[in-house]
Amino acid sequence: MDIKSTEVLELPKILARVVEFTSFSASADLVHRLAPTPRLEEAQRRQQETAEAVELLEQKSNLTIGGARDVRADASRASRGIVLDPQLLLNVQATLQRGAILKRTLGRLGGQFPLLGEIADFIEPNEDIVDAIGDAINERGEILDSASPRLGKIRSEMRVAFDRLMSKLNAIIHSPTNTKWLQEALITQRGGRYVVPLQAQYKGRIKGVVHDQSASGATLFIEPLSTVELNNTYRQLQMDEIDEINRILAELSSMVGERSASIARTVEALAQIDFALAKAKYAYAIKGTRPNLVGFRAMPGRGTRRHPGGAIELIEARHPLLDPQTVVPIDLALDDETYGLVVTGPNTGGKTVALKTVGLMILMAQCGLHLPAKAATLTVFHGVYADIGDEQSIEQSLSTFSSHMTNIIHVLDETDEHTLVLLDELGAGTDPTEGSALARALLSHLLDTGTTTIVTTHHPELKIFAQETPGLRNASVEFDLETLAPTYRLIVGLPGRSNALDIAARLGLPESVIDEARSLVKADDLEVDNLLEEIRVSRDEAKAARADAERIRAEADELRAELQKRLDNIEDERRELLQKTRNKGQRELSRLRKKMRQLRQQMRQAALPLDALNEIEGQTEDLETRLAEPVAPATEPVDLEDQAPAFRLGEIVWVRPLKMEGQITELTAEDAEVQIGRMRARANLDDLERRGRLDRKLAETERRRDPLPARSASPGMELDMRGQMVEEALPRLDDYLDAAYMAGLPFVRIIHGKGTGALRRAIRDRLRDHPLVKSSESGSHKEGGDGVTVVKIVEQ
């Protein structure tokens, strides 16, 4: 890819934003080195990798590479015999631990993420190194006593030696004899030796070695002779400790050095996974979608020109560097007859932004990044070349025109049928007549080579050229004459119209000047402008009508699908209901037969006639025969409009008096019990309304405009009634308990304070017999003790 063009299209700025989502330097380096690939298979692999990372984060939102470090350089140094300090060894340990966790996670997910799984296979946990470092160094980077038996012994002896030294020094500084000679009774260090501060004027009063003196010379820091041997012993043990720690660090570093290649492979695998996760997080940030990447198709030729077979289709594409709240998305599609686009329109109308958006979308897609667009189908181009902006160079004595021509000459040397060319303000910066002619010649050359080309221009001649030339098509950016501002919408198929006279009139230029200017413009040009405006208005009206028709059709399709689903289920539900009824009848008959056998036996024993019983048995056999008959299919089609609504257990219904949705839990011929959240309510069947998916969506919209009653909302877990009179407090308590019950709160706290106790007694008396109160008790000490009553609400 052309490096200069990627910079012009601002790809490095996009990569800088992706870097912000990486977890450590190794993956950040991969992002910085990322470049668009010209190979279709590689671009598709990159997109698949990003898609897997997006899905992985959806399943494991807390997944991270946090804690990993790029320890490849440290491992390489260790392989050359350099001893690593404890913190570097902890970095190695943390990196290997994170690698092991990721490998296990992706291993458990099986084949859901094949590309990420392949990368994870290169992770080598090196658990022996992790355990060795963990056994020797704690999380603060301190060497543990258990790192080696010798270190444990040395530190034990050090503690004993230190205690003896301190005991001796404390005896010296607290001795009544020595107190008057000391500057103050403390123990300090000089040069690694423990000393005491002696007043300089009493030098020699305490025999010892002078190690230092204060800046004023008034204090001497001496090591008493009686502690020299103790200091020597302690100091020797300190040096032994340092030697043993260095030996342990050298041993751990040697283990790391021996596995430096393995550790490097683990870091590289972690970097690739973190790189994929960073792309996924960036996709979330820009609300990106995966583009459909395709190759070049074989297209029929027309004369000397042949469509290169590339595809560019963007739907609601947004430039990712612009504010997503204000950026206007663009739609752009090149059909099978078009591989060149001429964009016209006013200055600051969005032509350059549209051009950059197209180029940047293609570069991002070939980098494996998802796109800020509703949908995209793009060809993987072998090269993308852009000449955008004013690159006037004083140092090289190049004008704007010369600068553009220099860039275009470079572009022409590199282009072929597999490249994309983006040219901004083609033919600008020179005489309009010559610039227009040059622009048309350049476009003809690019079309002849089969190069997919998009250009912006102000030359009106190029509009006619695009209209008459096969392979070329006009496009424009829209301008709102009412607000005198561009709308930034890109319209493919219509050239931009001149708005200079209209804008001047709106701004207040005298009408006489406007009229004279119109008289100087060719009548044909004015007629073309008027025709373009009429086409634009008709196009907008048609688009709005089409959008309304599509919305209505979508709603109708959804309703039709809902009704069809109901009709499809009616027969199954009928059969199921009949079968359940028959099963229930069979069970009742079995119980009846058993009862009749018992009754027959009792009647025989009592010598009673059995005629009546025989008649009952005959009727029972007839009923059993009818129950055994197969369920016949419905002979008449069900007309839903003529049928009264037959509700079913478990069905979702709308309770009109409550303006709430619930599920039927009990059903009779006249009414039903409906579960609404944690509350159950009984309602007449006439007050219930069956709702489909479309109905529920509309109901949800209605609820946004007409919120639920306040009693269904939580009133809060506490009610503070301090300072209130009993007469006003008790009604407020009842209302609060009603609201708490309706909100499904398990318990609440009533804050009444201690005071004289009158309010507390009244509240607790009311709670004792309240139908919504399961139990009540004083709050704990932390909750306020007797000043608070904790109330448990009855379950719904």
Image (cartoon, grey):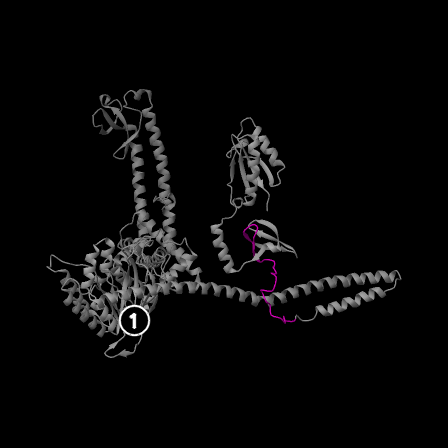
Above or below residue 473? Residue 278 is above
> Is 603 on the left-hand or right-hand side of 462?
right
Q: Quadrant of residue 298?
A: bottom left
Taking depth in this image into account, of 606 and 459 the one nearest to the observer is: 459
Q: Main secondary structure of the magenta part?
A: loop
Q: Quadrant of residue 259?
A: bottom left
| x and y, in percent, of residue 615 in the image | 82, 66
> Is 582 on the left-hand or right-hand side of 483?
right
The answer to whether residue 35 shows anywhere in this view is no
Above or below residue 765? Residue 307 is below
Q: Which residues are magenta?
A: 632-661
Q: Quadrant of residue 731?
A: top right
> Is 455 on the left-hand or right-hand side of 608?
left
> Is 715 on the left-hand or right-hand side of 310?
right
Q: Residue furthest front?
A: 512
Q: Residue 635 in magenta?
A: yes
Residue type at tag 1: Gly
Residue denoted by label 1: 310
